Image (cartoon, grey):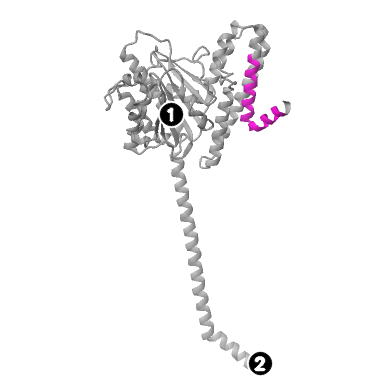
Amino acid sequence: MQRVLSFQMGRGFGESSEYVSKRMCFSFLFSVGFLCLLGGFLLGRFATDQTIKMRERRILDDLAGNGLLVTKDLQLQMIDLLNASVFHENYTMEASVESLRKQGVERLRDVFADLSIFRLNVNETETSLVATICGTVEQDRYVVLSASGEGFDVAIKLAQILDNIYRTKGWEPKRTLIFCVFYGSTDYCGKRFLNRVKPDIAAYVAVHGNAARGTDEIVVSGSGMVQATILDALNEIKFYHRLDNSFKAKQSPNSLPRLNLDVPHAVLSFVNPSSNLTTEEVELNQKILAQIVALSMYRFSEEIFFQWEPNYFNEIMSKALDLIKSEELKETKDHLNQTVAMFNHSLVEFNKKLKDTYVLNALDVRVMNDRLLDLDRALLCSDTKLRSITDFVQFVRFPQEPAHTVEMDLNNIIDCYKAATEIILEQAYCRRIFKDLVEF
């Protein structure tokens, strides 16, 4: 038996078996196939990951500078086109802007409807006209231009320039742009259609009346975020025209009052009206207003995050507090100073959190923007007649009023800033509402 086993084992070591060779061949082929499959999978996954990373990198490059850097040339082209424009020119309908203003707005429909970017989204009444450019990303967020008087020229010229860029560059706004022009002294834009879209208005920019018939000082008044964005645009236009020595942005409590609107807004105008201005000077002022409005509305539409650095706010607040000199009000004034300092600290922390938000997360971006809009509305702190309790203009009358009246007004302002701070700290509106109901 041992001889047989020894013989078989010797044969096994010295000769190859047909059965063993087939099994080894099959195992080898299977191993090679598996390795090829695994390698193909890993290579495909690597290629896919690289494609995704490259696409994400391209998107991030496009979103650099808060989404505005890649279109810097387009913004400059828009400003150049406005600079080359001639205001008060005759239109194809053989009616000048001046005659349009006298006739009302009933014929303005033809001007806006002829612009392809509006896609016939133009509606009119006897006293107002609303033309809409639908957004491509956030159609339910609205940037509104309200225009009357010399604002007609600003609205029409800006609409034509945007139409030009749309036709030649294929540009369309990310958020919806609304042009609302009205005839007369009553802001029908704010009284009529706004109630339907009020919660979704990101910015309401107003150029009303004789806004261009002033000297070299321009005033911007309104809610903090919108005012700051327009003032940034104003400073860029000053540099564009090299007007640093002859053109001033006047920011003080003794300026334009805010509008009676509880939406983020700003109104801008040249001040110190003069009847001695030449036609060329008025047209230059209109051109400057149009460029400021164009740059501001473009940024409100295109920027990823709404921005608010409180530098201008702190400057005006400091001037406003300097108007309160009564010793009786020193304690209340100090309390307001402390409240504002707490608000500023909270806003700085919010801006840090804003910078850490991932720009490709659309939901997080939307949430942060909505919080900033809520903050801007809260800082208006409108009363039952939609007058802003925190309007800096009222500080001008404080020196002439009794101390107890001023103290009451200052305490109301303090409450407004405390409520705004709560919003920054993510203490939502509903908590304050239910708290008020319980106290009631």
**213 w.r.t. 50: above or below:** above
Depth check, front residue: 153 or 26: 153
Q: Which mark is residue 297?
A: 1
Depth check, front residue: 331 or 69: 331
10 Å crowding of disc 1: few (<14), some (14-19), many (20+) = many
**48 w.r.t. 362: above or below:** below
Give whichever of discs 1 and 2 has the lower sequence position: 2
Q: Is residue 77 visible to the viewer in this orientation of the structure?
A: no
Is residue 286 located in the magenta-colored stretch of the structure?
no
Depth check, front residue: 99 or 29: 99
10 Å crowding of disc 2: few (<14), some (14-19), many (20+) = few
Q: What stretch of residues is rendered in magenta?
A: 409-437
- Residue at 40 percent of width and 10 percent of height: 273
Residue 391 place in picture, x, y as percent: 56, 17
Depth check, front residue: 6 or 416: 416
The image quadrant of residue 20 is: bottom right
Q: Amino acid at mark 2?
A: Gln
The residue wearing badge 2 is 2
Tag 1 near tag 2, CB within 8 Å: no
Q: CA distance from mark 1 to mark 2?
A: 100 Å
Residue 368 place in picture, x, y as percent: 56, 35
- Provide the major secondary structure of the magenta segment: helix
The image quadrant of residue 176 is: top left
The image quadrant of residue 8 is: bottom right
- Residue at 49 percent of width and 61 percent of height: 41
Q: Quadrant of the C terminus?
A: top right
Instruction: Describe residue 123's horizontal placement relative to residue 197 as left or right.
Output: left
Residue 55 place in picture, x, y as percent: 45, 47
**283 w.r.t. 145: above or below:** above
Residue 221 place in picture, x, y as percent: 49, 19
